[in-house]
Amino acid sequence: MEPLSSSPVRACEAEALGTQTPDTRTTDTDAPPSAVETVREEGRLLEALGTDAAGGRVFAVRIIAYGDSKNGRRYPPEVMRRAVGLYEGARAYDHHRTAEELQSSTIAGMIGYFADARAADDGIHADLHLLPSASQAAEALDASLAVQALGAPPLVGISHDVMAHYKPVSVGGRRMQEAIAIAKVHSADVVADPAAGGQITRMVAGGLGAAGDEGQEDAGGNRGRDDGPDGRGGGGAAELLHDAGTARGRQVIAQESAARGLPPASIEHVTRALPARFSEAQLSAVIDAIQAATGTRERAELRPAAVQVTTEARDKKVAALDEMLSYQPKGPAYRSLREAYMDLTGARPDFLGEDFNRRILRESFGAGFDSAMRAAESMDSASWAQVLGDAVTRRLIAEYGVPNLMVWQQIVSSTPTGLDFRTQRRGRVGGYGTLPTVAEGQPYQPLPSPPDEEATYAITKKGGTEDLTLEMIANDDIQALRSIPFRLGRAASQTLYRFVFDFFPTNAATTYDATALFHTNHANTDNPAALGQSALSAGRRKMRRQAAYGDGSDILSIVPKFLIVPTDLEELAYQLCSSEHAIPSTGNDPADRPNIHRGLVPLVIDYYADASDWFLTADPMLCPTIEIGFYGPTTEPELFTQSDPNVGSMFNADKFTYKIRHVYSGTVLDHRGMYRGSN
């Protein structure tokens, strides 16, 4: 087993805890523990306990629950019970402190401390003693209790900030980090992030009396309220009670709500918060709570941002990782993978003997990376494996989309996505030709049924693997790491580029009529036809004279848009496509003859071996040419890693393997929009 590290690792997001009991039957107990990590988890506000001797408010809270957190960490009950003493006297702040604030020991934002920490059945409980000056925090906690009692989301939660020892475990195929010891409690803070978790269960005394001044529950499970200074009590026997289910009761609620300035939409919330039979004092107290909660929520939303801007800080680090993988960084970039790992995770090399390079390699696996799934998920995870996988994927896609290898898109008429591996069929039905004349008094004759044909293809997988080795990390070989997404992205792009442009020189038979793409039967080829003004005009004429399938009378009048040439014909192609006047074929040709081919778009395909063949294609939006269909939701390649570092390449060879997969295929839809000249 690897020794524990004492180096802190800081995480930026606080996640809400579930209350599941750890399932030890699926735990990988042989996995080594990782370094000490600083983490934050959401707790729960339980009740208001009144005030202490110093005049500060006191609230009962559950700091953390046992079980699994949403960010993939597990807190066993026995570990947390051993750590309960660390929470005694822990400070409370109104925000999570940054690493700089921790180092400076600033008291800015301190609002109180925790006392009477205890291990309950569901988690660590304690009493939060607020400083007398922490009026805003007390107001937010009171309002949070009030809105929770009404069934609304809480305004604030309790989030602990601790250093802990973890070990990796596998739970049902999911990689998790299980706490084996809590090393230090920095604080447990009040955070204005109710969406992250903490639920409020009940309100005790509302801070108006000492602990134990609970209102009594009525038969409907509702708590009465003590008489306040203004004499508005909680349902005395002599007080008039209204029935919330009657028209009179609803009228009383509506009138009082309107008189107190609540919008009509709030009347339903007031009604739900009241018992079946309510007094006017109870109605007034509920309206007070809703108004206080609304005012506090509005002030919280308008409050200036705190000193910690974790999203922006993380975005800067992710951007630096992206720039590190680029051959031409445009901003601040990490100088090595080790530096990126240490900055993003906060980890430091372990002086007790842990192989830090292997740790980076191991942590790069995480729970397995799937770029297709990541595209549909939130990108806020602080996991190193996901951050690294996202960065490599972004660089791979950037290299895949290099403009000179994406020109195939200009000549393709359709690129459907989400296909399966069955044969794809693209049918075409012919026309009826011209209608025959019907003589006077003669019956109309049935028209001949038009012919039909279909182009077919089936998608296939293309892909491969590339390795990140232990040696690359140990040597800080940034060039080797940078080359991984570069080579994978370029390979995928080059493969698809050649797949499309190979349709022209290979001249394979079309799937719809088993005839070569360029054939005399298709009337779309000439030989000899050396590229020149007259040969280009001949090709244009043949394309214009093409007739629709099954209807020889329907002349399509197709005109070319692209001129595809090998490298040797590049200069001539640009002259033909851009010259204002036609290039004379002989000395007798007039020099001022307009160039009908001006505006053609030349596409130079450098890997074409035949220096004399050239091709014309029509605008694919006006005439079907080629279809390229893709598996999955996008046209881009996908990146994967294995989910378990204890098997496969990591276990056998100290290397981390990326797999790229690109699934697609295609076919020629119609020869009529294409022409070949050869010599």
Image: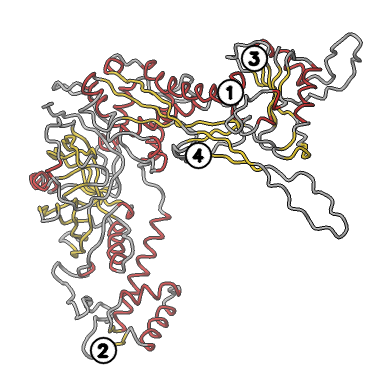
Q: Which colour scheme is used?
A: secondary structure
Q: Is residue 41 left or right of residue 419?
A: left
- The answer for how far apart the CA atoms under marks 2 and 4 are is 70 Å
Compared with 575, 548 (above or below) is below
Residue drawn at point x = 54 percent, y = 31 percent:
666
Which of the two marks, 2 or 1, is nearer to us in this view? 1
Which labelled disc corresponds to residue 566?
3
Task: Examine the image and state in which quarter residue 169 appears.
Answer: top left
> Which of the marked residues, 3 or 2, is nearer the chain's N terminus?
2
**On the rendered image, what quadrant is the C terminus found in?**
top right
- The answer for how far apart the CA atoms under marks 4 and 3 are is 31 Å
Q: In this view, does 548 lie to the left or right of 266?
A: right
Q: Where is residue 432 in the image (x, y as percent from the top left)?
A: 73, 46
Q: Position of residue 353 (x, y in %)?
A: 14, 20
Task: Examine the image and state in which quarter residue 606 appears.
Answer: top right
Q: Which residue lies furthest to the front in this view?
A: 442
> Which of the marked residues, 1 or 3, is nearer the chain's N terminus?
1
The residue closer to the viewer here, 62 or 235, is: 62
**Residue that label 1 marks:** 508
Which of the two marks, 3 or 2, is nearer to us in this view? 3
Q: Mark 2: which amino acid?
A: Glu
- The answer for how far apart the CA atoms under marks 1 and 3 are is 19 Å
Q: Mark 4: which amino acid?
A: Thr
Q: Mark 3: which amino acid?
A: Pro
Q: Do the numbered discs 1 and 3 sit on residues whose CB atoms are within 8 Å?
A: no
